[in-house]
Image: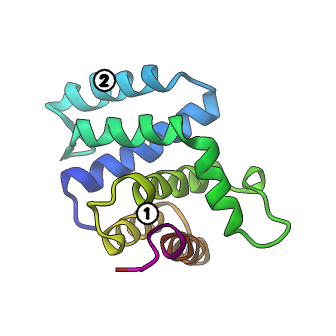
């Protein structure tokens, strides 16, 4: 995965969303903690890569504020009988952030969104789970953007 500011911010956003859900933390508190303690402590780097803090904030806050409508989109693309509540929380956080981007950040091409999140998935999940994420994201993109590129 190419490490650039936006890619790095996406990874941090997924981790922040996971923290919000796992610890039932307030989104603003988690955003502030990430920026103050994880980004700024290391000259706005986290895990060795600069972050786009504005993009990070938009992803986390926007995803959190729209979580219910995002979950409706995701749920429509799961196999019959599957529910978000049955899924790994990290995978859900990844799919939520990607869905938020597809819906709200239309200046980012669909292919970029899918490629970025599939690459991130490959950092955390096995091949079958990465393929699952790719399939869901492709399906979501077709519904949300009515295209794939």
**Percent of width and height locating residue 106:** 33, 60
The secondary element bearing badge 2 is classed as helix
Q: Which residue is most to the left? A: 43
From the viewer's perspective, is residue 50 above or below residue 79? above
Question: Going 24% across and 36% down the picture, which residue do you hit?
Answer: 53
From the viewer's perspective, is residue 97 above or below residue 147? above
Q: Quadrant of residue 51?
A: top left
Q: List the residue tagged with mark 2.
A: 37
Q: Which residue is most to the right? A: 81
Question: Going 25% across and 52% down the picture, which residue do you hit?
Answer: 6
Front one among 137 and 90: 137
**Percent of width and height locating residue 20:** 55, 32
Q: Which residues are magenta?
A: 142-148
Mark 2, other Cα within 10 Å: few <14 / some 14–19 / many ≥20: few
Q: Quadrant of residue 148?
A: bottom left
Q: Are marks 2 and 1 in contact (CB under 8 Å)?
A: no
Relative horizontal placement of residue 3, taking residue 142 as reference (left or right): left
**Percent of width and height locating residue 92:** 60, 53
Mark 1, other Cα within 10 Å: few <14 / some 14–19 / many ≥20: few
The C terminus: image quadrant: bottom left
Q: List the residue tagged with mark 1.
A: 123
Front one among 5 and 137: 137
């Amino acid at each position: 995965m190419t490490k650039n500011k936006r890619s790095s911010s996406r990874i941090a956003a997924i981790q922040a969303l996971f923290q919000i859900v796992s610890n039932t933390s307030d989104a603003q508190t988690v955003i502030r903690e990430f920026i103050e303690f994880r980004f700024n402590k290391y000259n706005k780097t986290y895990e060795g890569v600069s972050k786009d803090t504005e993009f990070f904030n938009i992803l986390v806050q926007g995803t959190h504020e729209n979580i219910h409508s995002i979950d409706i989109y995701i749920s429509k693309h799961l196999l019959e009988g599957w529910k978000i509540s049955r899924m790994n929380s990290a995978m859900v956080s990844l799919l939520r952030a990607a869905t938020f981007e597809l819906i709200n950040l239309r200046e980012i091409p669909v292919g970029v969104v899918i490629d970025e999140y599939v690459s991130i998935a490959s950092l955390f999940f096995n091949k079958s789970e990465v393929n699952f994420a790719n399939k869901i994201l492709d399906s979501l993109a077709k519904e949300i953007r009515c295209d794939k590129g």
